[in-house]
Amino acid sequence: MKKHLLFLGPPGAGKGTQAAIISKTNSYLHLSTGELLRKEIDSNTELGNQVKDIMNRGELVKDQLVLEIVKKNLCTDNKGWILDGYPRNLSQINSLNQVLLNINQPLEIVFYLDIPEEVLIKRLLMRGRKDDNEETIKTRLNIYKETTEPLIEYYKSLSLLQYINADGDLKTVSADIKQKMA
Ligand code: B4P
């Protein structure tokens, strides 16, 4: 059975890493809004130029711009998919609900990747992407706590939430996700 999944959690929890592993094993579409936005920046598109500074500061890109990207990239065929990094606030939840209603593909599982703050800061500093410096990480974490963390309660109330301890090695974390997908 092809599944429709969402990976939720703070920056550096491993959403992108685990979504890539699970989508490869299952031939699912992996839709990472962060990755798609970075591609726009690398290709010097108008959208890329619009979002470059915002992302480098660790702030959220405007909801409407991210929604366009999601609509463009979410497949409507019968393939399973993983949303990674979207939605990130309540307004994005509303837009996503509408999109999923239109394509008649409801979310089935929301994986919440939980991890202690000190571990994720260490991981991000080690990775060293352009937006992985101490100041930007602080901004991203504050925005996460204020706007994204409340989404956990929302999905919990819909009984869609599965808790994942993301403070383990890659294989242990993916094994836990795979087991909870079965
Ligand atoms: P994202 O690209 O979504 O990145 P992230 O949340 O920082 O990282 P993620 O949790 O995916 O961590 P990863 O697996 O890479 O967002 C970047 C920016 O894009 C945002 O700040 C925002 O500006 C913009 N954006 C994206 N979506 C948006 C939206 N919906 N609305 C508005 N703006 C949006 O892992 C991090 C590191 O840890 C890696 O180096 C990895 O190798 C390592 N790692 C992972 N798992 C590990 C493990 N088990 N053990 C050890 N290391 C591990």
Image (spheres, helix red, strand yellow):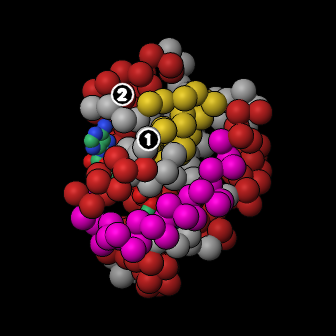
Instruction: Confirm whether residue 99 shows in the render.
Output: no
Q: Which residue is mark 2?
A: 174
Q: Which mark is residue 171?
A: none
Q: Residue drawn at (45%, 16%), measured in percent from left and top? A: 179
Q: Position of residue 151 (x, y in %)?
A: 68, 47
Name the element at disc 1: loop
Residue 24 x, y percent position in the rendering = 33, 34
Mark 1 surroundings: few (<14), some (14-19) or many (≥20) residues within 10 A: some
Which image quadrant: the N terminus?
Answer: top right
Reply yes or no: does residue 142 show up in magenta.
Answer: yes
* Dot placed on the residue nearer the N-terminal end, 1 or 2: 1
Q: Which residue is mark 1?
A: 115
Helix, strand or loop status at disc 2: helix
Residue 68 pos. (x, y %): 61, 66
Q: Quadrant of ligand 1?
A: bottom left
Residue at 69% x, 49% y is 150
Q: What residue span does the magenta drawing correspond to?
A: 127-152
